[in-house]
Amino acid sequence: MSFEAGVRHCGADHTQNCRWHIYPSIRCLQERAALAVLRNANRSIAERGAFHIVLAGGNTPKAVYRNLCDMETQWAAWHVYFGDERCVAPDDPERNSKMAEDVWLDYVPIPPNQIHSIPAERGGDAAALAYNEVLQSVSLFDLVLLGLGEDGHTASLFPGQEWGEHAGSPAVIAVHGAPKPPPDRVSLSANRLGLARQVVFLVSGVSKHQAVLDWVGGKPIPAASIFPPYGIDVLLERACMLGDDD
């Protein structure tokens, strides 16, 4: 089931246009998401010769990445970026880049110099400066994948902290004192995450029900601060919308 709804971010002068797609199970959501990624990749490569994708962390995207391993595409044309990262060692299992490597990137022939990990092991401030430089080479991402936390956070943009949602905000920001461990992180800003031809949120689990209600209701959560030019596709497991597992 799908429907469209404009969500007005409190204090903003414009509406966040969301297309809500509801799936009966998490497996169905993950399969459809993988196909959506592949479709975007093939279209981008056909039209522009390259595909620039921003990855999300979390368990739902993890299964999507596994599904991508078995799909046929022009991997040499893919350019991979990350929406956020934890300030831990590169081989730490808490790293988003490590997760993506373990389940997907190590098994497909994307050129290593086209996988742009955030150097978060340098610390948040230094890593943000370095990744700002990396992102100057791409004006619009083809696809940004994002998740939604129980508190409405996305990437490492948390309630009560700076999100960088305004035009002119840095592309990448250091996050200190995050409410979830580790406290030091690096995140693309809300403004930079919105500079994309397609933005897709992957949302599963009954624990996200209140965050979804807050978002639909127009509350100023971090997920509501992203305004891509072509709107947002929200892929939801049924339980997120209804608040039950049945």
Image (tube, helix red, strand yellow):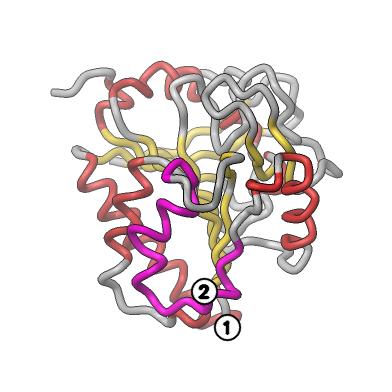
In this rendered view, identify the residue nearer to me: 134 or 8.
134
- What is the span of residues highlighted in magenta in the rendered image? 93-116
Residue sitting at x 36%, y 63%: 104
Q: Position of residue 208 (x, y in %)?
A: 38, 24
Looking at the rendered structure, the secondary structure element under dot 2 is: strand
95 vs 240: above or below: below
Q: Position of residue 121 (x, y in %)?
A: 64, 47
Please give left or right for residue 155 compared with residue 74 in the image.
right
Residue 241 position by quadrant: top left
Looking at the rendered structure, the number of numbered marks drawn on it comes to 2
Quarter that holds the C terminus: top left
Looking at the rendered structure, the secondary structure element under dot 1 is: loop
Residue sitting at x 38%, y 60%: 36
* Mark 1 Cα shell of 10 Å, populated few (<14), some (14-19), many (≥20): few
Kindly identify the amino acid type of the residue bearing the numbered disc 2.
Trp
The residue wearing badge 2 is 78
